[in-house]
Amino acid sequence: MSAVAIGKTAPRLIIDLLDYDPRFREQRPGKNLIADAAPRFLGACPPRKLPNECRHSLMKKDLRTVAPVSNDELPDSSTKYIVPTYCSACRYHFEITMDFTQWQDNHVPCRLSDQDNPLHHLQLAESIYAGAHPDRLVPTKYDPTIEIHKFVCSSETCPLQVTIKVSAPRFSRNLMTLLEPSKLIARGVKEIQAEPLRFEGLGPVSTLQALDYLRTYLRDTKAAGDTGPKRIAKRNKKFALAYSNECDALFEYLDFTTVQDGETEGDSPQFWLPPTITSMNRELINDFLAELDVLLEARPASEKHLAKVLIHTRPLPALKDIERSLGYFEYPTRSRTVNLEAEEHPYYLSLGAVDDFTDEFLSWAYDRQCQCDPPNKPYYLDCLEDLAKGRGSSDLETKVVMATSAGEYGLKAIEGAYRFFGLDPNTKEGDEHIMGVYKSRIESAPRQKEEAKNCLLAIAKARNSEKIQALANDRTMTFEEALEFLNISSDTASDSIEAAAVAMSLEADNSKVARALRVIANHRDGDYALERAAANMELDNVGSTLDIGEAYNRLQIGARNAPDETVLAYYQSLMNDAAPGSKDSYTEALRVIACDRQSHFLLTKLDDPNAVVHAAPSTASQPIGLDNIGNTCYLNSLLQYYYTVKPIRNVVIDFQNHRMELNDEDIKKKRVGGRTVAKSEIIKAQKFVDELQHLFENLKTASTRSIKPTRELAELTLFSSAAEANFRRASISSPSGPPPNLTSMFGDPPVYGPVYGPQLPPPPSQPPPILIEDDIEMVDHPEDKNDDDSSEATLVDMETLPNYEDVFIKDATVSSRPQKNETLDGDAIMVNGDDTAKDGKPVPEKQPPLPPRNKSGLVIQTNDKDVVSDDELWKFGSQQDVTEVIGNVNFRLLCALKPTSIDMSSGEQMDIVRDTLYGANAVYLQKAETPERKVEAWSNLIVFPAPVGSRDIYETLDVVFDEQIVEIDNTTAAQHASIAKLPPILHIQIQRTAFDPVKQIASKNRNPVIFPETIYLDRYMDSQEPDSALMRRRRETWRWKAQLKVLEARQAALKNTEAEMSVADALIATKDYINVLQEEEVDGISINSDLPDLLEERTAEIVEELGVINKEIAGLKQSLTEQFTDMRQYEYKLQAVFIHRGEAGGGHYWVYIYDFENDIWREYNDEYVTEVKDRRRIFDHQGGTGGTPYYLAYVRSSDTKDLVEAICREVPEVEMTGVTDTWAGDIEAGTVGEDDENVTVRHIEHARPRPLRPKPTQGFDTVGNWENTIGDNLDANGRPW
Ligand SMILES: [Zn+2]
Ligand SMILES: [Zn+2]
């Protein structure tokens, strides 16, 4: 019997044991569920069990069991657990021994808390069968073992050895026939007829009784002490009726002996003497007793009733002891609908896993299986891929993508690759033949080269052929060969080499010339002039006539100045979804762009998608990037930013100590944003924080340069529950139906007007949207279900909110907020400046309208209610305001956390997030002599760029805080705001998108907002004294601004005429004309001779006036800038700048974050985190098509150390095992992958998916309908069975 290296996890082994019925082994040779490898699933499998096979119900033999009594009990070097069991149905015996005594110094047995070895993974060491191994295993009465299977844990640090012994029932079929009902009747009749008087009133006994007597004898025997067992007289009436002298075989088997009464020597024996229990027969007797219990229990109820046999004590199930001994009792399982009828998908068996495994365990089982059985890796990858799809698990899908990007191929992919070349996957042809097929294919169809290359790589991997791999990677040429081919020497200059190559390409094979160039380029440490020449030649080779503009169009890139990384990202996302035929055209486009830009980065990526170009290694001093998971907008920027905010990061990482408890009483008390929250919202919020915690842990410890946020996290971040519900409702509405009403879809229409609080409270009159929280399993309805569950993104402190409505809505003739049915233009009558301004109407500072959060009529279909496609996620995310999303993140954090205290006046929850990010304004409305004062909380301030020209940050903030005139009750009232509470971290949103209601499009205001690294907020602070020194200064600036407005209006009037000429210039021109007229003495025109002088005079006056105005304006501006410069108590430092490039509703996002400790600005651009050497990139904003800042984070200067920290890394010293053997683990520059000889790039494990993996051309069934198909029966080694 050959030992098979394939292993299985401990839970899998025990399930297999429960399903394995030894009685049928002979009928199904070669298939032993315990010992043999699971059959390889290729579309079908034979049934795992026959209908009448036993699913064992294992009972423990209590006395002999040695197992841990609690989950905390851990094995040590002397531990040997044993769980002897029998099946209460078929009476087979299974004895499982778990032996830890082969313990060595470095040993740590697998345990659930150990990430690397959570479960034992058992590999069969040997199987011994009685009959097959007569020299090693002969069953006897006392040791009837018929099979022994020995396993060793595959973990190098685990000493566990498991032995499973199988034996048949003690009470054999032969012996049982002695007590059949028919035999008992015949026996009884015979005895009674022989001595009718003696047996008067008695009849034959039932099987149940016969079994029961036997049980009594054996129990008495066991109970007998020093006096020894009582002998049994054969003449005993019960004995005679049940056994007579026909059952000697049974009693002899049980070690009964016959004895004579001393006086009647010579007669046949009169008594049975039960056995004395010895170590030899103890198990025999115990097992037999246990089986008697089983048999008695199984007798028909009619027999039981008649015989009045006592109910037996129930045996104890053994599973718990087995599971504890094997260390997997209560292991974490995934939640799913359990269908006991359905068999597990065979892929689980192949991975040695169990259906109920969590994704983490399944992923681990896959790794372990690959490690133990490398030749079958492709098959295991297929298993994992299909199970990932079946489970809809993004983590597992990521795992598959990572494996493929690391150069692994699934079996189906390999078969697809063979078929691409028209080859049979099982072809016996040698490598040379396959290489020949490849060469002729790319010769006849050069445009398919990229695809052919990737198919060839798959085949190379499957065959483990270096030769084929070298051909696929164009590495068949050595550096020396390349030099010789181009007839140059190793020190020839690059331009000369290029010239030589071009000359040669006229007569020689272009692709060979290109290859030679690339070999030399690589050898010269990525000489990109040569790389470019090679790429150009390859383009010539396929006859490309693509021009650069078309190339950008083909990759759907709008801005030609997009960074290389962005270009690559577009290319990769297109490649991922492209049909095989169109892939080469994308590659062609990328090559054209790479040549055009002379981009070493792109050229290298073209040569090897997994190459890391000039990459700084992942170290403890470098933050980790976040892979872009589809166009999810500012998701990555936000996640990176939150990670740098220390109080929030700490709370998230230490979430278990801050988690809100789910008891109804606390939930009832909880107030977030002025309302109670439903339990389901808290559960969802905690799920979000769990996901965030996971991400943060990875950002802290990852050894890769970037990691990937999960889709779940993306959804939970970008969607608020209410928005999501609305979105999903919109998604399932019929596309032919009426377009969804904007208001109903997204709650309140956008709000414009005075920007005191950045967000206004939800109107109480709005009916609550239906909350759909259908992906939460344990939804509980709190008794006081909230009346107002409206948009949770609207996160405003409600301390004064009821009154707010009174003041600003009920009392206002024209509300500062749009009422229902009001046009969007009719809102907010706002007057900026002093109402004494008479000259020229004061210009209302009306903010541009915001875009609606969805395009009218947009209907997106989703099939699966829980899964939103990339595209939809992006569409949705792009319609959301960043403020809304940050609001959503904050809301989720607040919901998930338990309060640190409760605000007495509002009942609002106080916690670390609130303390860190929330500020408050005091709003003064001068309706009467004394102004009304209202306090409003906010989590950020919204400012607007100027409609024309630039503004600095103070000018934008002035709009928020300066005095403005609002109309109330047909009169006007002055209103201004001050900061009542400054948060430690101040967020400022620069609202750049505006919505054109006529054109129905969103547009973006790109005008620069100038923000310095340091700002002082003293000037906006609330003093509560109307006549404080600060207020006097503020009022002074308001007056200056009013004057400034008048002067600027006058200046504009003097400077500009219809003819786009200043008044002074116009007068001078007129005077010159008149002079001409006078000199020429035109007939009929008489000119007052004083006129030129008058004109000259007037011109001089105007010039003088303009001079004065300019001077005054300059003076006022000077005063305005200097008015507060001496006030520097509330100092804030810029920490983060969020950037958007592109149009409204699309484009690219990244963030700059300042590292206070190291005085470094870094750009976090998805997976790339790079140092910004030239800070003008952050602070110079000339508008145009470059990136525009849209969100700023400032930190209180005095506490920067406590509040933010750009680098928080704990890179563990990882020893890389064979599982991740593609990662060299070496971070020295120039470390090469094993197949490279002279290349300066590294292969990294997490690299993007190799986009060119061929799709299987033949359909394989995925999880779900596999039972119905028929195929070959092969085990995981491909052996038939
Ligand atoms: Zn059984
Ligand atoms: Zn182990």
Image: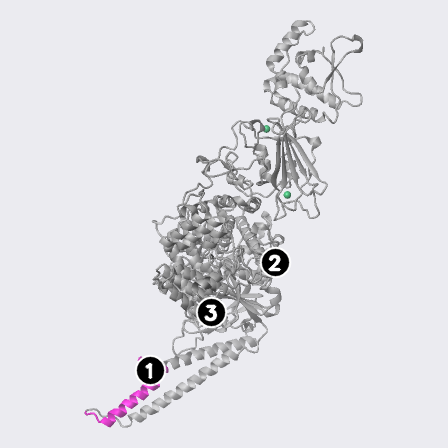
Above-or-below relation of 744 to 1149:
above
- Residue 1056 on the magenta span: yes
Q: Nearer the viewer, mark 2 or mark 3?
A: 3
State the predominant SS element of the stretch in magenta: helix
> Residue type at mark 2?
Val
Instruction: Give the quadrant of residue 766.
Output: bottom left
Quadrant of the picture in which ligand 1 is shown: top right
Residue lying at the far left of the rendered structure: 1083
Residue 351 point in image, percent of width and height? 54, 42
Q: Nearer the viewer, mark 2 or mark 1?
A: 2
Q: Can the viewer see residue 579?
A: no
Q: Can the viewer see residue 606?
A: yes
Question: Which mark is drawn over residue 1061?
Answer: 1
Q: CA distance from mark 3 to mark 1?
A: 64 Å
In the picture of the structure, the residue carrying the numbered disc 2 is: 1211
User: Mark 2 or mark 1, which has the lower sequence index?
Assistant: 1
Give the crowd class for mark 1: few <14, some 14-19, many >=20 residues within 10 Å: few
User: Mark 3 or mark 1, which has the lower sequence index?
Assistant: 3
> Residue type at mark 1?
Met
Residue 1189 point in image, percent of width and height? 47, 67
Residue 169 point in image, percent of width and height? 63, 25
Is 220 positioned to the left or the right of 489 in the image?
right
- Residue 597 on the magenta span: no
Quadrant holding the N terminus: top right
In the picture of the structure, the residue carrying the numbered disc 3 is: 492
Q: CA distance from mark 2 to mark 1?
A: 67 Å
Residue range corresponding to the magenta coloring: 1054-1083
Give the crowd class for mark 2: few <14, some 14-19, many >=20 residues within 10 Å: some
As helix, strand or loop, the secondary structure at mark 1 comes to loop
Foreground residue, 882 or 510? 510
Callout 1: CB less than 8 Å from ligand 2: no
